[in-house]
Structures are given as structure tokens and as C-alpha cells.
Amino acid sequence: MKFSHPCARRAAIVLLSWACLNLANAATLHTWVLSSQPLSEEQLSTLSASSRLLIMVPGVSSGDLSKQCAFLEQIRALSGHDLAIFFDRQPGTLSRRMVSPAATGPAAQNLVTLCRTFLGSAAEGKTIDLLAHSSGTVVVNKAAEIIVADGSSVRFRNILLLGTALSSREPLDALITVSTRILNLHSMYDKVNRSINDSLGVLPALEGGAGRNIRMDRSLSGRLVRHPVFIASNPESWIAYAAWLGEGRWPGPRPPVDECPRDLAELHGLALWVQRQPDTTPREVHKLIPGLLTDPDPAMKYYGVVLAGLLDEDAHAAALKLLLEDEDTPVYVRKEIYQALGNLRDGRHVDYLRHARERDPECGEEIRDVLRELKRQRVDPVR
């Protein structure tokens, strides 16, 4: 069974605000954007009818709004949440331009108000899960402090912190009190972590109990995880984040089995296994790659590219380059192709990668990182 969602491919995702919700289609639209407008009675009804709510709290600059909402919708569809809300706190104001008490305090209060509205008077059976990036992690922590100070009954289930802007010394007692599980992903290549957090993004207060820190310096294929990469929309992020936010578990490796992987989650687990021990990977896994690279679903292609790079399959280099010539190949797949070509450590691809920086500016940073790594490995171009 392959992953498919009506908003995932050709159909553009519909973005909403509280002020312009198309109520005629409210039952079929699952990702909303929160603005400063009050909710109507119809909107309140839609919100109260939901039982599993996912809220994304972005940082001061979260990139293109439509792309971020598409990213959130992919996670929601996989995690099983009824409704997802992109908490676009006070767009265009101080709150979205800098991290300061004057900006994050009101945003935290608004977040608590939203959660109270969702829970209403009959909170039993309702859950709230949070995904926070950069300064959004500060807003979430302050919201927890407000909840504790007010004696509110608002509680969070699973919280995912990405590229945190919280100091390693920041008190997290309130956040731990009002949450069931908290996971903090950090990377040594994240400049925000390095400038704010002297432990490169580690939050010591989360160690033990329901809290957890996971260091994620590189993606499955080996791409560097910089600050924006945490919220880059690709199958690797969709699957891992959805598993945590929906079930409270971080995906682990899946050893090869007799039958082929049936869906993206199984492919993700298989790629994790191959990443850890590529030299002992059975031939059956190698044989999956051609079919994945020609699969009509770009998400399946993504894992074919990842496996080709992890298994050092130079035989697929021509097919990978052919995908780059296809205008329908998404950016997230192209980035993986450049990394896969770099993983081959073959000087015959160096000039190709150099020219690609000019042809494919959307992937320029990733190509630069690949070329730098090849230079460190002393892989010279072969002409």
C-alpha cells in the first residue's frame, strides 16, 4: 500500500484563516492557518467536533506559508489527527520578527487560549500534540508556564521540539508537568543551537523520564541537518514526525524481511537499517532500487534514491541523473539525488555536481555540502 493523499501531489493545498474558512467544505479541509480574527460559530463547531488536534508553532521566519502548511498536512495525514493548525502568530508583527518577552509572551497566551477553546467543557478523549520549531519552542515553554500558573487543566500529549531556541539552562519544569512526552531533536550544524544553546541544542532537563534528546546531525542519506532542514518537507520528516506526534514513538530500523516493504513507513525503517549496516545488506534489498526509482509516486522514488546512495550503487548513477532531467521530479527528491551521487565517491561525478550548482539553485546549498565533503575525502574530478 503506497502513501497517497489528495493534497500531496497535483492538487494544491487550500490555506485557511479563521476569517476566511470556507464553511461549505469545512468537513474535508484538515489544515488551518491561525490568524488574529475571532472564530465564528461554525468554526467553533468544527473545532469542538475534533478529538485529535495537532498544532505547529513556527519560529520567527518559517519560510513559504503554503509550503509549510503542505508539510504540516502531510504529517497530519500520516499521524491520524483530525485537524492541524499552523499557529501563524501575529503575522507581520514583532512576534514573527524577533525573540523577546514582548513578542513570545502574547503568542504563548494566544496558544493557551486556542487550546482551551479546543478542549471546551468536555475535554475527555481529546488530545493536543505540538510541533515547535526555533523560537516556537520558546512560545510553547511559556504557554506551559501560563497553564501551571493559572491552574488550567490544559494538557499536551506529544511534543516535538526542533532546532530549539531555548537555552540549555532554561527551566522546563512547567513543560514537563503539562506534557506526556517531549522529544528534542538537535544538530551540531544548527547555527541557532550553537549561538543560543551551549550544549548544541541539548536540553538537560529532558533527560530521563518522559523527556528525550536525539542528536540528528545528518539525514538518512547523509545531508547536513541545518536549522531550516528540521522543517523541510520530505518523506523522511513526514514519517518520523508523524510517528512521534501520533503514537509517541521515534521510528527505528526495520531488518529486511522476505516480503517487499508495503508502505513508506516500512521503507523508512528499512533505510534506517541499511544506513547502520550497508555492507551486510542482502541482495534482495539491492533489487528493490530499480522499481523504486521508476515508481510514479515521488515519495517512493525518494527512498529508492536514498537506498542507492547508502548502498554505493554506481550502477544507478545514470538513472539518478535522468531523474534530475525530469521537470516533474520534486525538489526534495533532487536534493537526495545530489547527495546519493556524492555518496558514490566517484570522481566522474564531480564536474556534473559543479555544473549542477548553476543549473539547480534550489539545491545549491546541498550540492555545495556534497562537493566540500568530496574535497575532504580527496575525490578529484575525472575527466
Image (tube, helix red, strand yellow):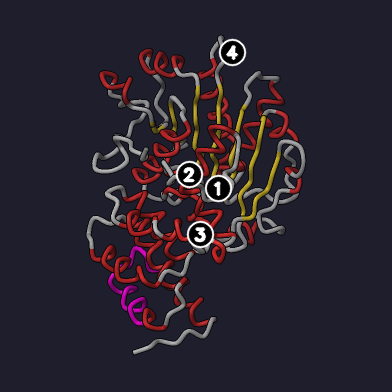
**Residue marked by disc 3:** 282
Which quadrant would residue 126 be assigned to in this image?
A: top right
**Residue marked by disc 1:** 254
Which quadrant would residue 354 be assigned to in this image?
A: bottom left
Mark 1 and mark 2: span between their CA atoms? 7 Å
Residue ID at (71%, 25%): 149
Q: Taking 135 as reference, is 209 left or right?
A: right
Mark 1 and mark 4: span between their CA atoms? 35 Å
Instruction: Determine crowd level at label 2: few under 14, some 14-19, many 20+ residues with C-alpha closer than 10 A.
Output: some
**Residue marked by disc 2:** 266
Mark 3 and mark 1: span between their CA atoms? 13 Å
Number of the front mark, 4 or 3? 3
Residue 295 placed where, x, y %?
30, 51
**Residue marked by disc 4:** 124
Is tag 2's residue or tag 4's residue first in the polypeptide sequence? 4
What secondary structure do most residues of the magenta stretch adopt?
Answer: helix
